[in-house]
Image (tube, rainbow, N blue to C red):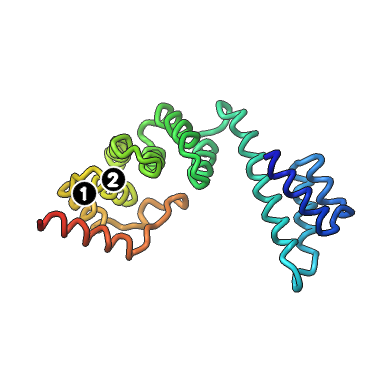
Amino acid sequence: MRVLLLILSISIISFGWAELNPIRDYLDQPSMQSFEQAVKHLNSIDTTESLQAELNLAYIANYEAMRLMELAMAKADELSAAERFSLANMFLGMDKYAEAIKLYEALNQASPKWSCPWRHKGEAYYKSGNFSASAQALEMAIQTNPEHYDAYIWYAKTLYQLARYEEAMTALNTALELDDNEEGSHFDEALPDDELQSLYDDLQQKLNK
């Protein structure tokens, strides 16, 4: 965050924005209120000839997100399950897998029958290259919710990486028989149809050898 703050400060000065009080006020004393004022100010700037306002908005938005995440992590034990899940998904979206997994594991212990944290922990393990741990987490997601479409998809992807092709095809076919909207979690990122088709074709090729 310090590096980001330094870069943004240099950017503001370099483009002659040192006099913009809302931006400086936010950098000096970051808070939700000062952030809102800075955003309001940046939105009022004419951007027809320069993208600098948008770029500075991106900087401070990222800085504010990191600031709030640090605050949330400092109070992780006090967060509700839903808040902890949201925070974990933010870390997952930022490719901070170790931090995400730690939060998902706490949710698994506190709410072992809640399928979504198991599923997302499986994704975090998958993206970090730990396919065995991913498979275990996804098996728990399916056990706690046998109709969790997204869990079967990630399970199929994981089993493919483990060269368990027959099981992967079974998982994929099971997913395709389910309603992909049934889970209703806005945190589940739908995989593109071409990616699913590619996985299906690859599995067919492996099984027909």
Position of 54 with respect to 92 (left or right) is right
Taking 120 as reference, is 12 above or below it?
below
Q: Amino acid at mark 1?
A: Ala
Task: Tell me the crowding category of disc 1: few under 14, some 14 to 19, or many 20 or more residues within 10 angstroms, Cα based.
Answer: many
Taking 129 as reference, is 198 above or below it?
below
Q: Residue furthest left?
A: 209
Screen quadrant of the C terminus: bottom left
Q: x%, y% of residue 19?
A: 89, 54
Residue visible at 54% across and 33% down in the picture: 80
Q: x%, y% of residue 127?
A: 39, 44
Front residue of 201/32: it is: 201
Position of 20 with respect to 39 (left or right) is right
Q: Amino acid at mark 2?
A: Thr
Residue tagged by mark 2?
A: 158
Task: Tell me the crowding category of disc 2: few under 14, some 14 to 19, or many 20 or more residues within 10 angstroms, Cα based.
Answer: many
Q: x%, y% of residue 147?
A: 28, 48
Residue visible at 37% across and 58% down in the picture: 191
State the SS at label 2. helix
Q: x%, y% of residue 2?
A: 70, 38
Residue visible at 48% across and 32% down in the picture: 103
Position of 160 with respect to 100 (left or right) is left
Screen quadrant of the N terminus: top right
Q: Residue furthest right?
A: 19
Q: Earlier in the sequence, mark 2 or mark 1?
A: 2
Q: Are marks 2 and 1 in contact (CB under 8 Å)?
A: yes
State the SS at label 1. helix
Q: Quadrant of residue 164?
A: top left
The label on residue 168 is 1
